[in-house]
Image: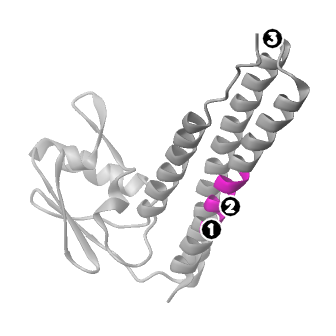
């Protein structure tokens, strides 16, 4: 009955790839002393009764290496966008110029770099937890199949497959974290 059991490792792998992609997106939002439009992606604005990403209320540009500008389309939202940026924890002080919000990116000091490496570590730990949760899902499927008559040898085989996949993805998270911390600490 359960002899034909086959764990969908492709699905697990796809979901673990999603955790890595999410980690990369979070890492892109961490500023490293250079301006980047992606650093504003996690910032949400309370617009029209819903939380909305900044890029949906204005045009985000990077006119020079240490400046990001946001051209807010609706004048009524300028204050809300400015407030969202101030409260985002990015450590950037927005400057208003009509409907354009300018974000000068200050040079990172040593203390801020250390804080950012801690934030990067927190993002990496969240990714590891996601991957471990996916491992648990896979292991639960194997236990269910074992209860349905899966042989012990097959159970051990599938458990080792899931664990190997998990180890591979945890290693990818660790490498991404190491690279990001190096990038942040670079002066």
Taking the image as shown, residue 148 lies to the left or right of residue 7, namely right
Magenta region, residue range: 167-175
Residue toward you, 103 or 15: 15
Quadrant of the image occupied by residue 180 = bottom right
Alpha carbon separation for disc pair 2 and 3: 33 Å
- Figure quadrant of the N terminus: top right
Taking the image as shown, residue 8 lies to the left or right of residue 145, namely left
Q: Are marks 2 and 3 in contact (CB under 8 Å)?
A: no
Q: Position of residue 153 (x, y in %)?
A: 88, 31
Question: Which residue sits at x=80%, y=42%?
Answer: 160
Q: Is residue 151 above or below residue 24?
A: above
Marks 1 and 3, the one that precedes in the sequence:
3
Marks 2 and 3, the one that precedes in the sequence:
3
Using the image, tell me which numbered label, if any, was put on residue 171: 2
Residue toward you, 121 or 69: 121
Residue at disc 1, secondary structure: helix
Q: Are marks 2 and 1 in contact (CB under 8 Å)?
A: yes
Decide: few, some or many residues near mark 1? Use Cα within 10 Å; few <14, some 14-19, many ≥20.
few
Decide: few, some or many residues near mark 3? Use Cα within 10 Å; few <14, some 14-19, many ≥20.
few
Q: Which dot, 2 or 3, sits closer to the camera?
A: 3
């Amino acid at each position: 009955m359960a002899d034909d059991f086959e764990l969908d490792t492709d699905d697990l792998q796809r979901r673990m790839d999603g955790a890595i992609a999410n980690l990369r997106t979070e890492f892109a939002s961490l500023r490293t002393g250079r301006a980047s439009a992606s650093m504003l992606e996690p910032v949400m604005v309370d617009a029209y009764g819903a939380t909305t990403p900044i890029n949906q209320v204005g045009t985000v540009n990077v006119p020079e290496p240490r400046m990001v500008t946001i051209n807010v389309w609706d004048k009524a939202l300028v204050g809300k966008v400015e407030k969202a940026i101030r409260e985002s924890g990015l450590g950037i002080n927005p400057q208003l110029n009509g409907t354009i919000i300018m974000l000068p990116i200050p040079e990172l000091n040593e203390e801020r770099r250390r804080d950012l490496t801690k934030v990067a570590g927190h993002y990496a730990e969240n990714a590891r937890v996601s991957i471990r949760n996916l491992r648990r899902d896979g292991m639960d499927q194997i236990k269910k199949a074992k209860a349905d008559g899966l042989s012990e040898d097959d159970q051990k085989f599938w458990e080792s497959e899931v664990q190997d996949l998990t180890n591979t993805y945890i290693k990818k998270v660790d490498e991404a974290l190491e690279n990001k911390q190096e990038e942040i600490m670079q002066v």
